[in-house]
Amino acid sequence: MRDLKIPSQRHPEKAHKVDNPQPKKPDWIRVKAPVSEGYKTTRNIMRDNSLVTVCEEAGCPNVGECWSQGHATMMIMGDICTRGCSFCNIATGKPSNLDIFEPGRVAVAVKKLGLKHVVITSVDRDDLEDGGADHFAQTIRAVRKQSPDTTIEILTPDFLKCEDRILETVVRAKPDVFNHNLETVPGLYPKVRPGARYFHSLRLLQRVKELDNSMFTKSGIMVGLGEDKQAVTQVMDDLRSAEVDFLTIGQYLQPTAKHHGVDRFVHPDEFSAYEQAAYGKGFLMVSASPLTRSSYHAGEDFKKMRKARYIKLGIES
């Protein structure tokens, strides 16, 4: 059996790659180690319900802050991904069969944590005919049943190898936010996200709006991978052409020496400039900072985004 704590077994597709230097992080990137009682409580609830979180699997720098507040991003369909993106710390390989009881366990954990907003993501499951779309839908419905007042945000794979109709399965389950990350600019896809297609991901987000125009859509990219400012601006324009409501931009942090190298650490002032530019292009909500991640402060940001829509439509919240 594979030991996913051993890098060569966790990422066999990267084992042969030349090491990339890991530069020292600047002061604005540093975070405190997770030690609070709230963190331990959240961790115990995840363990007791045999749940996987992207917070741990992807090595998120915000895990201490989020878990101390009882916020965790659930990762469904296992902890092994069928893709091998060069930036990602999630294990790569052949996943196990879906756990039919997992949607129920996620719902129980959401209720125990008392979450008012939950983010549910997954590994890529190219081995499944529907890419895991029905499993997403079942999880959404299970959470709705247990916690009807909780708003639900999903962060999905691209369903690249599935029929177009598969997307309807997820949209019909009525998540409050449909998130799918572009991750980087199109010119870097061959190196950073080789198993994906930029314009397919963009079209996926556009189709969500076509299926349900009232649903909030969201996407994000990392910077510091080798992109330039013009390419980032073009991604903003592409996302607005797909009517995406919410944009996140965060600093790429290299998980190991075998992963894609950090090209540079983007200064907080540059993130502020990206945020201002994105709002100018019409996004309802923008989160751009070195430590921004898809689910970072997701609940608070959802409220801000919903309020922005109400104001735009002239509706009292």
Image (cartoon, grey):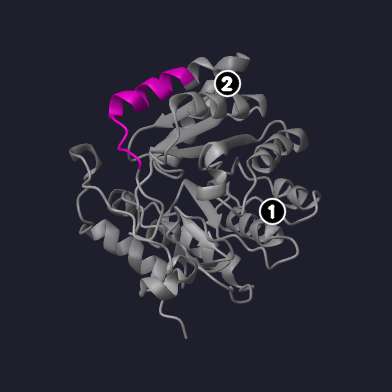
Judge whether residue 262 can be spotted in this image.
Answer: yes
Q: Residues within 10 Å of mark 1 (few under 14, many from 20)?
A: many
Instruction: Name the residue beneath numbered marker 2.
Output: 310
Q: Which mark is residue 159?
A: 1
Find the distance from the CA under tag 2 to the CA under tag 1. 31 Å
* Sequence-earlier tag: 2 or 1: 1
Residue appearing at x 50%, y 15% in the figure: 280
Residue 121 vs residue 226: left or right? right
Q: Which quarter of the rendering shows the C terminus? A: top right
Is residue 93 located in the magenta-colored stretch of the structure?
no
Magenta residues, dominant SS class: helix
Q: Quadrant of residue 180?
A: top right
Identify residue type, mark 1: Phe
* Viewer-nearest residue: 201 or 17: 17
Q: Position of residue 312 (x, y in %)?
A: 58, 16
Identify residue type, mark 2: Tyr
Residue 196 vs residue 261: left or right? right
Judge whether residue 317 can be spotted in this image.
Answer: no
Above or below for 71 versus 184: below
Residues at discs 2 and 1 in contact (Cβ within 8 Å) = no
Q: Quadrant of residue 306?
A: top right
Residue appearing at x 58%, y 52% in the figure: 194
Residue appearing at x 44%, y 52% in the figure: 87
* Viewer-nearest residue: 192 or 46: 192
| SS type, badge 2 | helix
Q: Position of residue 260 (x, y in %)?
A: 41, 52
Residue appearing at x 61%, y 55% in the figure: 195
Q: Which residues are magenta?
A: 263-277
